[in-house]
Image (tube, grey):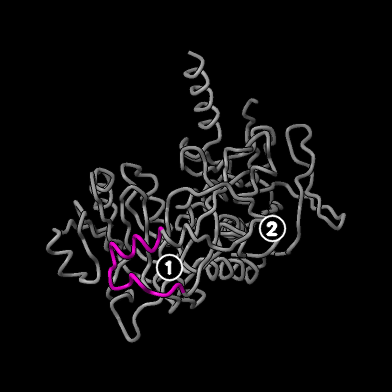
């Protein structure tokens, strides 16, 4: 399918835009569109940060180490500016500074390739000797760790709460929000004509932005389809010793352990407990109907890692758990682009487990694309996935 030219809306006095999905990407996109002068309606089936969404749950990591991918570090820098702005305006403590400790059992080339970019953009990062790391963090057992890096500007964002704060800011600024289930309307003459709601009503707009996370593939099977694959990801919270401060943000940073599987954890930010999750992509999940109970196998893997790396917590009780999902693109990069067959439809998704932190910058980028026709980086465009699929088919046929 050929790529249609965009239809910039900046010439309209008050362009009407419908944003479907009030999670991290959709909420921030709606807020930016409103700020730039559009008339915006935000629609979600279950509400911002709901348990079925990829933006739900207690916390998300924000960090800037992205290997050699400078564009992501730049987006993290911009995201920090926008997070700080909405935190100041709302008065809500959505961010807790912890730092991020990167533990590599083998090669640390991923971190090393990012150091020059980080320092240029103002993100301090230090390499610690194993002896220094042991002295700073006695609650961690560093056996088997080859190298340790400390990313000083990193922390935890309050995920579900942040989605609600963004939605509230959007409404206070004059945006319209409703909870409803929609279906995309027909595409005719290279444009979408309307949205259809379950109650039989229609919504007409000049442009439509679909930021529906794991549901994007079902809404647009021909354009997205399995290019976004939701996977089941389990998150656990273990109880810490009574009265102990060793697992609070002031004493323990966010940590990422690169072994056969990648585990990460967040200190006891909200009194919820010591958070740990396996970053390995899980089994496919239906985000609408899936049972959200944790599995015995997942809990056992988490306990094994805890016993190895945090021996004091080896027998800690499981006090809470969450089951969410990643909405993975084939290469792990974001999808921010217009529909190839409808010049007034834009798609934003493919967070792939790392997109939440970037959401203020993603929303800004998407809003600028919708209103002015500004191109997004090639890395985020849909045609890079079609080109990759074509190259793979050619290779497999040889």
Q: Name the residue tied to disc 2.
A: 39
Tell me: residue 369, above or below residue 278.
Answer: above
Spot the residue most to the top.
398
Which mark is on residue 84? 1
Residue 396 place in picture, x, y as percent: 49, 19
Residue 30 place in picture, x, y as percent: 61, 58
Q: Residue 303: name its quadrant.
A: bottom left
- Res 331 seen here: yes
On the rendered structure, is 119 left or right of 269? left
Q: Label the magenta part by its dominant secondary structure.
A: helix
Q: Is residue 86 magenta?
A: no
Cα separation, mark 1 vs mark 2, equals 25 Å
Sequence-wise, the earlier of marks 1 and 2 is: 2
Q: Residue 113: name its quadrant.
A: top left
x 37%, y 56%: residue: 263
Q: Residue 53: name its quadrant.
A: bottom right
Residue 361 place in picture, x, y as percent: 47, 54
For the record, the magenta segment spans: 301-318
């Amino acid at each position: 399918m050929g790529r249609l030219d965009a239809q910039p809306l900046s010439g309209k006095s008050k362009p009407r835009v419908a944003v479907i999905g009030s999670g991290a990407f959709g909420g921030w996109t709606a807020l930016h569109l409103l700020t730039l002068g559009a008339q915006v309606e935000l629609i979600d089936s279950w509400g911002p940060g709901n348990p079925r969404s990829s933006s739900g749950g207690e916390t998300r990591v924000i960090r800037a180490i992205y290997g050699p991918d400078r564009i992501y570090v730049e987006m993290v820098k911009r995201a920090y500016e926008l997070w700080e702005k909405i935190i100041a305006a709302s008065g809500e403590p959505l961010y807790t500074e912890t730092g991020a400790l990167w533990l590599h059992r083998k090669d640390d080339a991923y971190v090393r390739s990012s150091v020059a970019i980080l320092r240029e953009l103002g993100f301090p990062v230090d390499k610690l000797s194993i002896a220094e790391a042991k002295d700073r963090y006695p609650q961690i057992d560093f056996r088997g760790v080859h190298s340790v890096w400390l990313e000083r500007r990193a922390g935890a964002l309050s995920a579900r709460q942040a989605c609600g704060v963004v939605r509230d800011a959007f409404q206070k600024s004059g945006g319209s929000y409703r909870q409803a289930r929609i279906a995309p309307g027909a595409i005719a003459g290279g444009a979408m004509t309307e949205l259809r709601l379950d109650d039989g009503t229609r919504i007409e707009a000049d442009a439509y932005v679909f930021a529906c996370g794991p549901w994007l593939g079902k809404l647009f099977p021909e354009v997205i389809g399995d290019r976004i694959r939701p996977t089941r990801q389990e998150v656990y919270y273990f109880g810490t010793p009574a009265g102990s401060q060793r697992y609070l943000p002031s004493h323990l940073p966010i940590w990422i352990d690169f072994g056969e599987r990648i585990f990460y954890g967040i200190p006891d930010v909200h009194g919820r407990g010591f958070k740990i999750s396996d970053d390995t992509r899980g089994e496919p999940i239906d985000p609408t109907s899936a049972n959200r109970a944790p599995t015995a196998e997942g809990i056992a893997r988490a306990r094994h890692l805890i016993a190895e790396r945090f021996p004091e917590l080896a027998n800690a009780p499981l006090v809470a758990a969450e089951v969410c999902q990643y909405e993975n693109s084939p290469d792990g990069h974001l999808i921010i682009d217009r529909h190839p067959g409808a010049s007034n439809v834009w798609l934003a998704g493919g967070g792939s487990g790392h997109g939440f932190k970037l959401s203020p910058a993603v929303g800004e980028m998407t809003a600028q694309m919708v209103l002015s026709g500004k191109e997004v980086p090639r890395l985020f465009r849909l045609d890079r996935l079609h080109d990759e699929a074509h190259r793979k088919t050619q290779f497999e046929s040889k």
